[in-house]
Image (tube, helix red, strand yellow):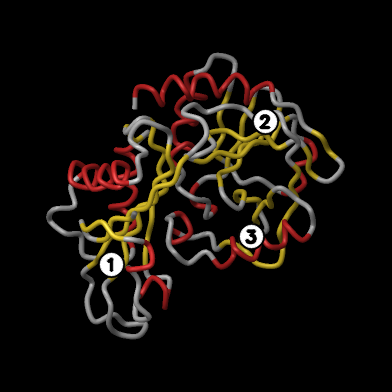
Amino acid sequence: MINLNGNLAQETEVLTSNNRAFKFGDGVFETLKSVNGRLLFWEPHYLRLMASMRIMRMEIPMNFTLEFLQEEIQKVLDANELADQPARVRLTVFRNEGGLYLPLTNEVSYLIEATALSSPFYTLSQNSYEVDLFKDFYVNADLLSTIKTNNKALHVVGSIFAHENELDNCLLLNNHKNVVEALNGNLFLVNGSVIKTPPLSEGCMNGIIRKELIKIIEKTEGLTLEETPISPFELQKADELFMTNTIIGIRPITKYRKKEFSSQVAQQLVGKLNAIARLS
């Protein structure tokens, strides 16, 4: 069951051929992790959604409060019997039908989906995880690249490239040829006690876990955080690489080309992230 504008429905009953998210990618979304009915980092997700809608010139309904959307998400969790277990929630907001590139209205609709997850905690996978650069297309270093829109053509093609080349993920470059992020998460590079991550000005996603980890690292004695552009040449010199997103938390990268990486710092950080998540 999904939630379309407050009404529970089957997935097959929802979209028409005139849906603007389908036709033009005219939508934004948030992917959230729910644990026993509690949305992790819900407030920063909500604030990012509001910022994304403003950037896309969408009209924000008066009832789109943090509490209202939380209640609407809870309806979906209850309907799918996911209120007492970990779940992935996707909240999509799309502009209402009408128009071509220029819409007839800036009013919006919303759709909420939920599926089960296996673990309520962020755990650090010990499995091999190999990546390489995806160089066919580039991320634009601008504000639009930092929000989660439905236009994910680059990420779809990059995911197919990774599958065809037996990779677990790809790292994306921006139009300045700097490394920006992974296909589905922000990137962190560890050299000794220094941890680097690209700044938002490079076009990376304004990730929720990215922001939380930045705060954690800045408070951790012995570690230094630098928001700075990352050149591809730095990857093979790193001690560790790891990616982050709301669902997996922290995912160590074990191999990039011929270079293999450890995960000591990632192991140190995942416990701190879980502690913050329990309080969010």
Q: Say what secondary structure mark 3 lies in.
A: loop
User: Nearer the N terminus, badge 3 or badge 1?
Assistant: 1
Side of 81 where 247 appears, left or right: right
Q: Is residue 85 above or below residue 166?
A: above
Q: Is residue 66 above or below residue 271?
A: below
Mark 3 closeness class: few <14, some 14–19, many ≥20 residues within 10 Å: some
Residue hosting label 3: 176
Residue hosting label 2: 190
User: Nearer the N terminus, badge 2 or badge 3?
Assistant: 3
Q: Is residue 31 above or below residue 176?
A: above
Task: State the quadrant of the C terminus.
Answer: top left
Residue hosting label 1: 57
The answer for how far apart the CA atoms under marks 2 and 3 are is: 22 Å
Q: Are marks 1 and 2 in contact (CB under 8 Å)?
A: no
Residue farthest to the right, as pictured:
258
Identify residue type, mark 1. Arg
Q: Say what secondary structure mark 2 lies in.
A: strand
Query: Where residue 146 sits in the image (x, y, percent)?
Result: 46, 54
The answer for how far apart the CA atoms under marks 1 and 2 are is: 38 Å
Q: Say what secondary structure mark 1 lies in.
A: loop
The answer for how far apart the CA atoms under marks 3 and 1 are is: 27 Å
Task: State which mark lies toward you, 3 or 1.
Answer: 1
Residue 33 visible in the picture: yes
